[in-house]
Image (spheres, rainbow, N blue to C red):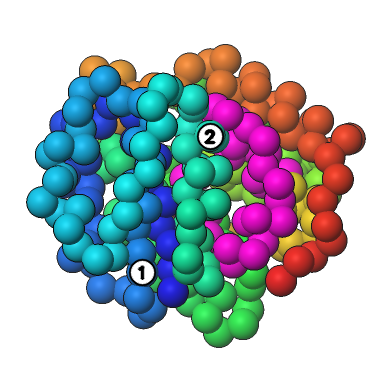
């Protein structure tokens, strides 16, 4: 079974559409959905209260905002599936792409799979966003002697056992860099699969700032130099 963790912070305008799209998606394995509301102030969970009766859905609530990383960690703790992945509630990603991410794991060809984005004029948030993303990926590749094209992708899929072995500590968006660094430091080779992507605008609720890129660079370096992770937990 696949666990799909959806961290939520003030996503009232997109949450229902995101969840409806996900529940209608046909995947090669059964899945559960864990909604982690991270102290939202917009009562977004009310928009999906009828959908939450689906037996595949469970809800975790943080009384105060603690950050995306904290929400992801809560989801990992609550997961019941053998495999686990993350999905943002902002409609930037297409859950149908999970089938492509699952294939290398189900056929035994990979343990960790990333859905990587090919940015274009109609999909990129901005020039600087794409440039920053590329630099973070280059920095990770340099530090861990590999080649990655999209460290910051939300679509990261691995066994729940591997996720839990990482002992993630990040509270904010640097969770993406920390998890990548720890996957690599533990000896897991990341399998990349192209996916569809449509970046939303700042007016639509884009939350990332340039400081998040700086935090990602520092987090990758810190993991490379100081983190202790168990080697190649399967």
Q: Which residues are magenta?
A: 153-181
Between 164 and 174, which is closer to the camera in this rendering? 164
Question: Does the stretch in magenta take in 173?
Answer: yes
Q: Secondary structure at mark 1?
A: strand
Instruction: Give me the residue at 35% from left, 64% from top.
Output: 32
Is 38 drawn above or below residue 146 in the view shown? above
- Position of 45 with respect to 165 (left or right) is left
**Residue lying at 15% horizontally and 37% vertically, measured from the top left:** 46
Counting from the top left corner in percent of width and height, residue 124 is at 37, 33
Q: Which mark is residue 137?
A: none
Secondary structure, mark 2, is helix
Q: Could you tell me residue 84's position as x and y percent?
A: 50, 61
Residue identifier under label 1: 31
Residue 172 falls within the magenta-colored stretch: yes
Q: Earlier in the sequence, mark 1 or mark 2?
A: 1
Where does residue 140 sit, x and y in percent of width and height?
Answer: 73, 40
Task: Tell me if residue 27 can be seen.
Answer: yes
Number of residue marks: 2
Residue under numbered circle 2? 70
Residue 3: x %, y % from top left: 43, 62
Q: Is residue 213 left or right of residue 219?
A: left
Question: Image quarter for residue 150?
Answer: top right
Determine whether 217 is above or below 102 in the image: above
Say if residue 133 shows up in the picture. no
């Amino acid at each position: 079974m696949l666990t799909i963790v959806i961290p939520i912070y003030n996503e009232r305008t997109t949450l229902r559409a995101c969840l409806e799209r996900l529940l209608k998606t046909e995947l090669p394995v059964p899945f559960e959905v864990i909604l982690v509301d991270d102290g939202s102030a917009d009562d977004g969970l009310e928009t999906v209260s009828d959908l939450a009766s689906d037996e595949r859905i469970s809800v975790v609530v943080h009384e105060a905002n603690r950050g995306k990383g904290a929400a992801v960690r809560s989801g990992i703790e609550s997961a019941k599936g053998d495999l686990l992945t993350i999905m943002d509630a902002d409609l930037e990603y297409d859950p149908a792409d999970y089938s492509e991410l699952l294939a290398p794991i189900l056929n035994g060809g990979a343990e960790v799979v990333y859905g990587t984005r090919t940015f274009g004029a109609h999909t990129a948030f901005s020039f600087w966003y794409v440039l920053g993303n590329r630099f973070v990926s280059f920095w990770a590749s340099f530090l861990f002697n590999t080649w990655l094209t999209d460290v910051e992708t939300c679509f990261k899929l691995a066994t729940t056992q591997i996720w839990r072995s990482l002992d993630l500590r990040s509270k904010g968006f640097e969770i993406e860099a920390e998890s990548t660094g720890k996957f690599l430091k533990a000896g897991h080779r990341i399998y990349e699969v192209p996916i569809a992507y449509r970046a939303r605008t700042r007016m639509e609720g884009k939350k990332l700032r340039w400081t998040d890129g700086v935090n990602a660079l520092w987090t990758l370096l810190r993991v490379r130099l100081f983190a202790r992770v168990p080697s190649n937990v399967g």
